[in-house]
């Protein structure tokens, strides 16, 4: 008897083992079968085409340019004066990735984004200093209100989380009435106050200062070797390269002023820097933790450092770096992608959650034109000042600084100019103050270009979205310390680069040699002219050199397919919002119905694979517009597995061939941010696919 049972168990184990092996290796197995007996529908069999326009040709590029001879042709001299139209010079280089357009022409740009002109906050508020002050010297918080009322304030961070969702802290604050100086405890880094007797009026006073962590300092000190390095990633949200030139002319002048023979620092302008993914986290989090580790959000315990061992802050700590992660926002993305407890030494984010609650400054793209003054300064100033103080406190150790400024995150595109003067001043002072004792390496860059606003329906705007700015600034002597780095950097400024290159380069500067997936070390390797978006890990729909063709007058068969895609889109949106299992049907979100398929774009990846981009409007909601990328493939493409949000693969047929259909992305083209989005997120939904059942008129 026992023998029989044993056999059954063994048999079961055996089946399980085979099943698991097949599951884990199904791609390898499929590839093996494909190689030995190519299937009818395959990119290995160009004879048969299943895409919408079979006559288009696919020419694989495989040449490799000769880096040695290219380097030899370049002489070491200052990088020259940067100009918005420099990108035109790239057209003759023979790059495999050559965008048709780099964005609005200079004239168009000046027309769409005219100069607005913002006053100084100190003039606007008739105020030269803030009326709340944290004194670390005597451990007290002071308020100095001009009238009889002595003030009211909140302090933070309010809990031990490093970064938080707005809804998680919103109800935790209890304003305190100020009577006399308050005790400043060890953890408090900021106060937000009001001198207005009416508790319902907005707060206008703020101060923020880092609290020195001696343990972290001493740990870093024991590991810092040689002249301390400051690796500084100064990120400007939503600033395409061309928008940087348009809206930050003083900063551009400053960069240009560095580029002369006797300058200590030289700056490099990367003219073809392509996004990796559409949004902030999709572009920045892969730099922090590698592309394999990136998720838009994850389920389960949120109070963790999701990126763990691959996180820059954890890798660099071993090299003697203290870390600062500073966001000028309190959005719903970074906390969901990183967890609430990334192991940064210093962090700025809860301050901006308090600002969300107690001031009328929003950092959303729909906060149109409104200048974000807080006392005598704009909100970004507090983050810059914090950074300055932090760097001063931590002299003698390596520092990794990440700042994310949101001045450009606004729908008209005009508000970006408010950063110009402050950034220029800050950078000038920063370099002059800390250069003597530190090796400063600065990545001044954007996550992506603007992607909202009424003008976003223009094709040049789509292109600018994909082409963020990237400037690399370092000491000439530092660059010289790497073999041929000047020549290599110079060449790379005119080649396709993307986010993973930043990770690889940054780690290399910190003496960490990582074989970063899709990354090229910009100081050491010449980016080949043949590099494609695919090589750089960029999907065709995020690639500035993908030529999307608009589909007009499709034949009946194609029209049918497009309609089925729109049905699938409608079904998918409804199943994740209206009919989400997390709620009673319709409790949170309404059921939607596609009104019209307004635009369809198409891009063919191979003879058997293509994707479509659909723009649809919604019945009874005039302003709502969805955009969706949908993959159609007749072979077992890897792209069918594309993250971040996995939608089901559907089977269908097209022109007689079997196809698989999968929605890749769904996004909103209209300005949807506001109370409905918040409510949906709090209910565990995505936010942008929900049209709330309850109507909100008072959009903030
Ligand atoms: C590839 O190399 C061949 C031979 O060197 C040359 O004729 C051809 O123009 C190159 N193609 C590209 C795209 O550079
Ligand atoms: C600005 O403030 C100063 C001193 O606080 C005051 O004397 C002056 O009248 C104020 N100006 C305006 C325009 O409110
Ligand atoms: C200071 O740094 C150490 C070492 O990273 C850390 O364990 C500790 O929690 C930090 N203290 C504070 C108050 O942040
Ligand atoms: C900014 O930082 C400096 C020190 O670097 C400090 O003296 C100054 O008070 C700060 N300003 C504000 C408004 O916090």
Image (cartoon, rainbow, N blue to C red):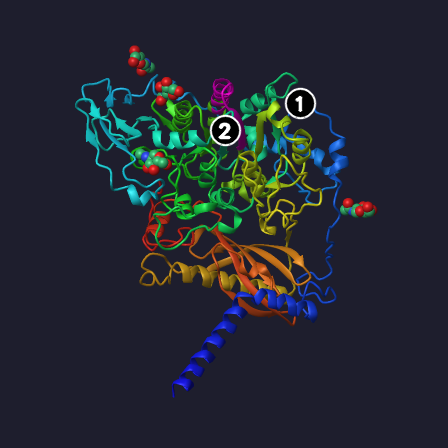
Q: In this view, does 34 lie above or below 224?
A: below
Crowding near the residue tagged with mark 1, few <14, some 14–19, many ≥20 C-alpha atoms within 10 Å = many
Q: Which quadrant is the C terminus positioned in?
A: top left
Residue nearest the observer in this picture, 402 or 350: 402
Crowding near the residue tagged with mark 2, few <14, some 14–19, many ≥20 C-alpha atoms within 10 Å = some
Residue of label 2: 225
Quadrant location of ligand 3? top left
| Residue at x 18% of width, y 19% of height | 148
Indicate the quadrant where residue 323 lies: top left
The disc placed on residue 518 is: none
Q: Is mark 2 within 8 Å of ligand 3?
A: no
Q: In this view, does 436 lie above or below 315?
A: above
Q: What stretch is highlighted in magenta?
A: 423-444
- The numbered mark, 1 or 2, whose residue comes first in the sequence reads 1
Q: What element carries label 2?
A: loop
Q: Can residue 697 be seen in this view?
A: yes
Instruction: Say left or right for 616 vs 143.
Output: right
- Residue 297 sits inside the magenta stretch: no
């Amino acid at each position: 008897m026992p023998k029989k049972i044993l056999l059954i168990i063994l048999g079961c184990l055996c089946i399980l083992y085979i099943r698991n092996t097949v599951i884990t290796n199904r791609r390898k197995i499929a590839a093996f079968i494909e190689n030995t007996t190519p299937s009818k529908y395959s990119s290995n069999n160009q004879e048969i085409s299943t895409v919408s326009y079979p006559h288009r040709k696919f020419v694989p590029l495989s040449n490799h340019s000769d880096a040695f001879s290219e380097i030899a042709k370049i002489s070491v001299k200052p990088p020259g004066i940067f100009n918005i139209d420099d990108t035109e010079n790239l057209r003759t280089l023979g790059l495999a990735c050559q965008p048709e357009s780099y964005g609005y022409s200079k004239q168009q740009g000046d027309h769409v984004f005219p100069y607005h002109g913002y006053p100084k906050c100190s003039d606007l508020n008739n105020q030269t200093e803030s009326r709340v002050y944290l004194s670390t010297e005597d451990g007290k918080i002071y308020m100095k209100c001009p009238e009889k009322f002595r003030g009211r304030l909140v302090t933070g961070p309010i809990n031990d989380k490093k970064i938080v969702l707005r809804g998680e802290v919103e109800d935790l604050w209890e304003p305190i009435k100020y009577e006399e100086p308050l005790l400043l405890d060890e953890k408090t880094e900021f106060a937000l106050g009001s001198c207005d007797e009416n508790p319902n009026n907005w707060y206008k006073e703020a101060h923020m200062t880092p609290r020195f962590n001696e343990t972290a300092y001493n740990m870093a000190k024991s590991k810092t070797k040689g002249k301390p390095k400051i690796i500084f990633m100064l990120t400007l949200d939503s600033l395409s390269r061309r928008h940087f030139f348009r809206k930050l002319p003083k900063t551009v002048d400053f960069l240009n002023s560095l580029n002369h023979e006797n300058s200590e620092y030289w700056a490099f302008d990367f003219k073809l820097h392509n996004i990796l993914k559409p949004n902030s986290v999709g572009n920045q989090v892969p730099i922090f933790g590698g592309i394999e580790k990136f998720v838009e959000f994850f389920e389960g315990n949120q109070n963790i450092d999701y990126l763990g061992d691959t996180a820059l802050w954890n890798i660099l700590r071993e090299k003697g770096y203290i870390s600062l992660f500073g966001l000028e926002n309190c959005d719903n993305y970074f906390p969901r992608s990183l967890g609430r407890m990334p192991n940064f030494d210093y962090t700025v984010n809860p301050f901006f959650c308090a600002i969300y609650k107690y001031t009328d400054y929003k950092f959303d793209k729909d906060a149109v034109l409104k200048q974000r003054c807080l006392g005598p300064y704009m909100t970004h100033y507090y983050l810059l000042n914090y950074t300055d103080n932090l760097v001063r406190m931590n002299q003698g150790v390596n520092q990794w600084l990440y700042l994310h400024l949101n001045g450009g995150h606004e729908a008209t595109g005009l508000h970006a100019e408010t950063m110009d003067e402050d950034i220029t001043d800050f950078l000038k002072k920063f370099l002059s103050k800390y250069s003597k004792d530190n090796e400063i390496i600065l990545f001044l860059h954007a996550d992506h270009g603007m992607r909202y606003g009424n003008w976003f329906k223009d094709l040049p705007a789509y292109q600018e979205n994909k082409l963020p700015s990237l400037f690399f600034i370092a000491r000439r002597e530092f660059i010289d310390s790497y073999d041929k780095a000047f020549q290599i950097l110079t060449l790379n400024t005119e080649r396709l680069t993307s986010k993973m290159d930043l990770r690889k380069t940054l780690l290399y500067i910190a003496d960490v040699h990582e074989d970063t997936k899709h990354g090229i070390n910009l100081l050491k390797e010449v980016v080949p002219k043949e590099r494609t978006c695919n090589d750089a890990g960029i999907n065709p729909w995020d690639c500035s050199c993908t030529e999307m063709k608009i589909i007009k007058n499709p034949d009946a068969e194609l029209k049918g397919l497009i309609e089925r895609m729109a049905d699938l889109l409608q079904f998918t949106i409804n199943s994740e919002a209206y009919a989400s299992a997390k709620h009673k049907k319709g409790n949170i979100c309404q059921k939607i119905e596609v009104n019209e398929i307004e635009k369809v774009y198409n891009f063919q990846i191979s003879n058997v694979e293509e994707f479509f981009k659909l723009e649809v409007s919604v019945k009874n909601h005039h302003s709502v517009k969805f955009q969706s990328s949908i993959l159609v493939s007749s072979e077992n493409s890897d792209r069918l597995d594309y993250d971040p949000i996995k939608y089901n693969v559907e089977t269908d047929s097209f022109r007689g061939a079997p196809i698989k259909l999968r929605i890749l992305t769904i996004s909103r083209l209209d300005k949807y941010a506001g109370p409905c989005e918040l409510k949906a997120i709090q209910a565990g939904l995505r936010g942008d696919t929900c049209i709330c059942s309850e109507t909100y008129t008072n959009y903030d």
